[in-house]
Image (cartoon, rainbow, N blue to C red):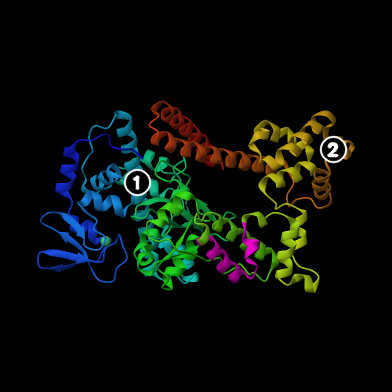
Amino acid sequence: MPVPTPSSDDAFAEVKAKVDLIKVVQEHVRLTKRNKDFWGLCPFHQEDSPSFKVNPQMQSWYCFGCERSGDVFTFVELIEKTDKRGALQLLAERAGVELKKLSPEQKERSDSRRRLLAMLKLAAQFYEYVLWSSPAGEKGRRLLEARMVSEETARRFQLGYAPAGRGFAEYLRAKKKSLQDAHDAGLMRSDGTDFFAERLVIPIRDERGQPLAFTARTVRPDEQRKYINSRETAAYIKGRVIFGLDLARDEITKRGHAVLMEGQFDVITAHHHGVTNAVASSGTALTDDQVRLLKRFTDELLLVFDAGLNPGNPNQLELAASRAREVLEKIPDAAVRDTYRERAAGWIGVQPHLLTAQASPSPTKRERFGERGGTESNGKGGLAPRLGGKKLTVGRYLLQLLAVRPIAFDRVRTMLTPDELDEGDRGIYVRMLETYERGGVSGLESELAGYPPEEQDLIRRAWAAPPPSVDDEVAVGLAERIRLGHMRARHSGIIRELSEAERGKDSELVARLEAQAAELARAINEIERRN
Ligand SMILES: [Zn+2]
């Protein structure tokens, strides 16, 4: 986030002259005119009768209840929980005032972020237009019908449809807009095809309604990846956005709590059914940044889990409990955390102490979940198999394939370095590779006895029940996916470091990280294009 330099009283004066305090306040407070002043309920303290007064002539405000007062900058500072410069930045953007005295690099960054945001806004409009007003949008409309989402709700969330092919690129060309910006925003592959092609597109917007990224659900039944997401960019850091907050913020303030759901579609459905204070953290546990953001509107969070999650099934019970633990851990206040632990435990049907952080990975604890779920009584249940084997990840799939078809190492070893694999897969991968290099395709059989027991177990299982397809092309595809995953994770890491470095004003580090991020993004694009 570029910060305006010690700027000049004239910047404040110019911005102040261009924005109307009444309009700014009205976005947060319902105001009623009485004589020459406007009155409303103070947004900074709890009250039932209005003691918050705004004077349009003086462009000032005062609360008789909490005795806070100020001008448009102090109002924005308090309501957006930012500082004076942050308030200046927000209001300057709104008023279209260019903040001067930025260093050339700051200006470049601020410009490129602004271009990115404009491009994302345009894309959202384009997709929305295609969804409702073009024949190509038919598949998207049918998906919404199947999900029972009305047009009104869909429009509130600005849902859209990305057509097959190069529709967006052609649109940009016709409008004489930069394709490069669309690339940078992660909207397009380098061959110009739409990144989200043939998907229902859901804009992820910030708390002011500006689209920052997209998540997109396929309409094709044969597509393996149901959802794909924008990668992180200078405009989008996943852990800082709360999905639905722009639409839910007023209702959250009014009802005094937010309903936190798992996924974006859950939120859309919830709003459709009148739960208009529902938001989502985008499928991850709440980050500290997200908690801070929500705290601007409420201290109360209500946690809701997937309706597909059935606590009667021990596997799902375990999943529900681990999700609850993840969310509970992020609540900073111990007393509040305990209250929610009790409630969550009630919903899930377990003892509250099983939702403490320490209660997670030990098998005995998991078995106790099983008991609570009532499976011990019928003697079977899905818990035991999960305790034995790990979930089949791309890395595991590749290891199984290599166990069955070691010759695939010839291709895989040239594409993948061990550090690109998950830590848990690395040791066995290296051991198998060394075995192959020493003993060729029959090496594994003769050396297997020297492997650690759980690695032997994985290999024997693969021999007994080989993975679905075993050939070199599949191996290459898996290796590529692993590389891509590793590169995306590194890219996210760099983007996070970058925003830290920007905050610390370390311009040398910023430049270096920007170069690294750009190079990595190019390489990621390249691989995505090939696929
Ligand atoms: Zn007040």
Image coords of residue 219 (percent x, y): 51, 60
Residue 445 against residue 210 in the figure, above or below: above
Membership of 346 in magenta stretch: yes
Q: Quickly name the residue at label 1.
A: 117
**Residue 518 occupies quadrant:** top left
Q: Quadrant of the C terminus?
A: top right
Image coords of residue 203 (percent x, y): 41, 55
Q: Residue at x 73, y 49 (%)?
A: 469
Q: Quadrant of the N terminus?
A: top left
Q: Residue at x 74, y 68 (%)?
A: 371
Amino acid at dot 1 = Leu
Residue 187 against residue 67 in the figure, above or below: above
Please tell me how crowded label 1 is: few (under 14), some (14-19), or many (20+) other residues with Cα within 10 Å: many
Q: Which residues are magenta?
A: 336-356
Image coords of residue 224 (percent x, y): 60, 55
Image coords of residue 202 (percent x, y): 44, 57
Residue 142 against residue 436 in the figure, above or below: below
Residue 222 seen by the camera: no
